[in-house]
Amino acid sequence: MSEFLRKLFSSDFMPHGYCYLWKPEIVWLHAASDGAIALSYLFIPLALVYFVRKRRDLPFHWMFLLFGLFILGCGGTHAMEIWTLWHGTYRLAGVIKAITAVASVTTAAALVPMIPRALLLPSPSQLRVANLALERENAERRRVEEALRLAHDELEMRVQQRTRELAAANAQLRAEIDERLRAEQELRKQADLLELAHDAILVRNLNDRITYWNSGAEEVYGWRREEALGQTAPNLLRSIYPSSMEALKEEIVRSGRWEGELTQTRRDGETIVVSSRWALQRDENGQPAAVLQINTDITERKRVAENLVSMQNQLAHMARVTTMGELAASIAHEINQPLAAVVTNGNACLRWMALAEPNLDEARAAVTAIIKQGRRASDIIARIRALMKKSPPQMKQLHVNDLIREVLILINHEVQRNRVMLRTDLTEGPTAVVGDRVQLQQVVLNLLMNAVEATSAAAESPKEVLVTSRNEASQVIVAVQDSGVGIDPENSNHLFNPFFTTKPHGMGMGLAISRSTIQSHGGRLWAASNPGRGATFQFTLPAQVSVPAA
């Protein structure tokens, strides 16, 4: 063994060149091939070592080092093949081959158990799929991160916006609190003012329980505040309403207010009449919550008004009596005509009956004429009695044209005596109204008498009076037009004032009573000068649907 080692580097054998007969083409072919292999086998281990150093994360990196050692050994054997072409150093060549064999066997022994583990490593396609999945996961992760970032930014914006809204709401709330405090102060001031009011002011809830009772209510009704609070208003005041309480509540909920007159009873038992004004109060949700009620005691005012109406009726009666006195001659003439006809027909009847053979047909005709003229006289007297009668107003349905014709009969003689031509243009349409016949007859009589007197006083001719009636816009319009002296512009604003007159012996109440009567019937009375001469007095009354008699 020592000799082997001593002669390890000795070239005491015949080189391989002799085997190739030193033919240059064969020698250099082997030399070049082995040289290229040796250089390649030298480069490959170097590359593997570099690769392993750079990729320490690779599994089985030690296997790459064993392969490098094995390949390096193989390269050494090929290098020795070149050397032994010219030198017979076969001992060293054998040692190198032995080292290479050890490296080869070690690599093979390590490779066999590693193969199952290596097979578990993913293939390139699997790696590509995994890479694609990883890329998708990364993309999804980036998308999620971007969404999270956007959500974070949006959340920040919302937080900032909400912060601003909260700040604005807080400022608004403070402003509302301040406004509510001011409103409460204003309400306290108004409540103090309500306490100063002489009217009875009370508030009741939807169950009619009294929740507020001012000092004016104490004075009007007699109950103190602590006695009235919590009581039911209709029961406490024993109120009499113009309609049912349910209907009034529906009205105030619908329109928000109601006005009318109520009859109530004070604590001492005295009955009073109040002008009541209701206003609906709603809560913050717009739902009905309570009713504010302001009651004004008008008992004395009503009594005065009733006395005034009574005095007006008495005055109107006096005016009618006075007018009847002025028309005494005309009335006597109108009554004398049918009476004279009665006398004439009575005498004729006696003559027909006194014949040897009584002419019953002519006698019967005379008696018929007597009956007719008697009824005519009776109608005239009835109209006069109606005008002279002192009775309360009776509102009934009547026709304006009939009123006009009845008055024309009464003043017919007066018209003829004053040589006035009276014409009528009465509508053929309906003229039904609701009113008091006597009062409306007095209006027409006053206007016609004034027109006849004004026309008779005029120096110019013709002396005409025109009475017209028409129905338009649900109203009946009556006009009395004369050709008299007209209306002095200085007197136009005083025509309907009480006790104003341009007649030497006039009372000045005719037109005032007429206007008051027309207004009480829901109409209007006015006067205007004609374009040429004279004046026109007109009045309107609400038209009614005529109901035929049953």
Image (spheres, helix red, strand yellow):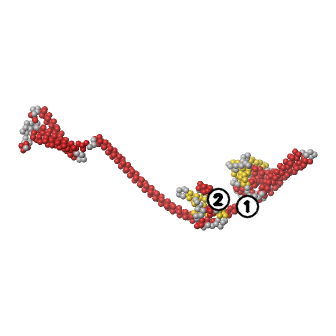
The alpha-carbon separation of the residues under discs 2 and 1 comes to 29 Å
Marking on residue 191: none
Within-10-Å neighbours for mark 2: few <14, some 14–19, many 20+: some
Relative to residue 510, is residue 33 depicted above or below? above
**Going 69% across and 54% down the picture, which residue do you hit?**
522
Q: Is residue 132 left or right of residue 167?
A: left
Residue nearest the observer in this picture, 351 or 102 = 102
Can the viewer see residue 89 in this picture? yes
Residue 25, position as x, y percentages in the image: 13, 32
Provide the secondary structure element on which disc 1 rests.
helix
Residue 501, position as x, y percentages in the image: 75, 58
Q: Nearer the viewer, mark 2 or mark 1?
A: 2
Q: Quadrant of residue 205?
A: bottom right
Q: Quadrant of residue 105?
A: top left
Specify the amino acid type for callout 2. Answer: Tyr
Marking on residue 241: 2
Residue 265, position as x, y percentages in the image: 65, 64
Relative to residue 26, is residue 256 depicted above or below? below
Provide the secondary structure element on which disc 2 rests.
loop
Residue nearest the observer in this picture, 106 or 532 = 106
| Residue at image mark 1 | 311
Residue nearest the observer in this picture, 121 or 507 = 121
Q: How many marks?
A: 2
Within-10-Å neighbours for mark 1: few <14, some 14–19, many 20+: few
Specify the amino acid type for callout 1. Answer: Met
Q: Is residue 253 left or right of residue 433?
A: left
- Pointer 2 and pointer 1: residues touching (CB < 8 Å)? no
Q: Quadrant of the N terminus?
A: top left
> Of label 2 and label 1, which has the lower sequence position?
2
Residue 101, position as x, y percentages in the image: 15, 41
**Going 27% across and 43% down the picture, which residue do you hit?**
122
**Going 35% across and 49% down the picture, which residue do you hit?**
145
